[in-house]
Image (cartoon, rainbow, N blue to C red):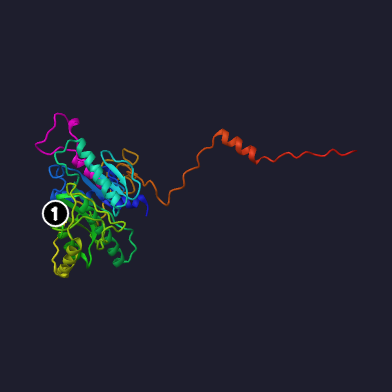
Amino acid sequence: MGRASKDKRDIYYRKAKEEGYRARSAYKLLQIHEDYHILDPAQVQYGAVDLCAAPGSWSQVLSSILACPPPGDVPASPAAYVPPPVIAVDLQEMAPIPHVTILQGDITSTTTAQQILDLLAAANRRRGARSADARASIVVCDGAPDVTGLHELDEYLQHQLLLAALLITTCVLRPGGTFVTKMFRGPNTPFLVHKSELFFEEVRVVKPKSSRNASVESFLLCQRFRLPAGYVPRLRLALPPTAGEPGDVLLQVQGGSHHTPDADTYRVAAGRRTAAAEALLVPFLSCGDLSGFDADMCYDHEVDEEHTEGGGGAAPHPAGRRAKGHVLPPVQPPLQAPYLPPPPPAPRTRDETDGSARSTSPKESPTKKTKQ
């Protein structure tokens, strides 16, 4: 579908380009914050982590909101205020975003989790944070796999990504923090809510107004994080291996102390309680102003009521009135896309050209003189 027709159909797509956001998904996070105030600077004093961040619209929202000092903490000058760090993590390469640290890595990797903690600790030391805890105040994730059209498979893949985001969140989120992640509603939604309630005191399923009604997309909003007694943060879904087995790497995030609870016992006990997950009643709430734009409606471009083609007494434009402005290009095109042409080869230097010519020129063979 052409760019012009898409501009005409989706109001949030057009607004995102007009306001400088890299994707329309920025309004989803803004509308969740509008209702639940999850990004208030007073609550996000130790930084934010954006998982599966590409192309970076949620990181833009985090950076812009956290750039304002919290009430009662007015610095001597605007330049003296150092905002909390924002860490954007994704497997893909991302274009730079002002005041955002970009980390290219895998959220299922222990190395990535440790790098996030190191970046948060270094940033908070530079800004003179009072707490020695290196973990973030909020973790958000707007990642989703490429859909296949098979709803059951798409739901399964999305839930696996959600669980991976939840596992790394238990390593990098400080107590009392907030976790927001995308999810596809389906038969297993109560199970995911039940799993999340093991780590958060309050769990909701919310749907912003900018999310299309025809989509099964929703967001899991988890608040007031606390680790269950006896749980060891790790990036594994299966039971931990025996002591000393290769790959059994634990992150020491609780003030540097070593934890030696019986994680196997805890997981077996938690598994026995999952039978009641199907009986849960999951709260489902809508976010955003009801008088705002509808993501499923078609809106015309803004028009100039006084403009007519030719001026004076000329007939009006055939389309009624001419639209203001023009179709805007994307704010940040992808850096690596399959449809992009390959980069041109690097120009060769003169020495390389001369050497290649000498190596490919045929050697002159001596000729034998013959008698006439």
Residue 296 quadrant: bottom left
Q: Crowdedness of circle 1 by 10 Å Cα count: few (<14), some, many (20+)?
A: some
Horizontal placement of 260 versus 242: left or right? left
Tell me where residue 306 appears, x and y as whole percent.
Answer: 26, 41
Residue nearest the viewer, comparing 259 with 334: 259
Q: Is residue 87 above or below residue 236?
A: above
Decide whether residue 81 is among the magenta residues.
yes
Residue projecting furthest to the front? 244
User: Which residue in the structure is indicated by mark 1?
Assistant: 226
Q: Is residue 190 above or below residue 253?
A: below
Residue 15 visible in the current orientation: no
Residue projecting furthest to the left? 72
Magenta part of the chain:
58-84
Quarter that holds the N terminus: bottom left
Q: Is residue 141 above or below residue 367?
A: below
Under mark 1, the amino acid is Arg
Residue 99 quadrant: top left
Q: Which residue is located at x 23 percent, y 51 percent? A: 251
Residue 155 quadrant: bottom left
Decide whether residue 224 is among the magenta residues.
no
Residue nearest the viewer, comparing 196 with 6: 196
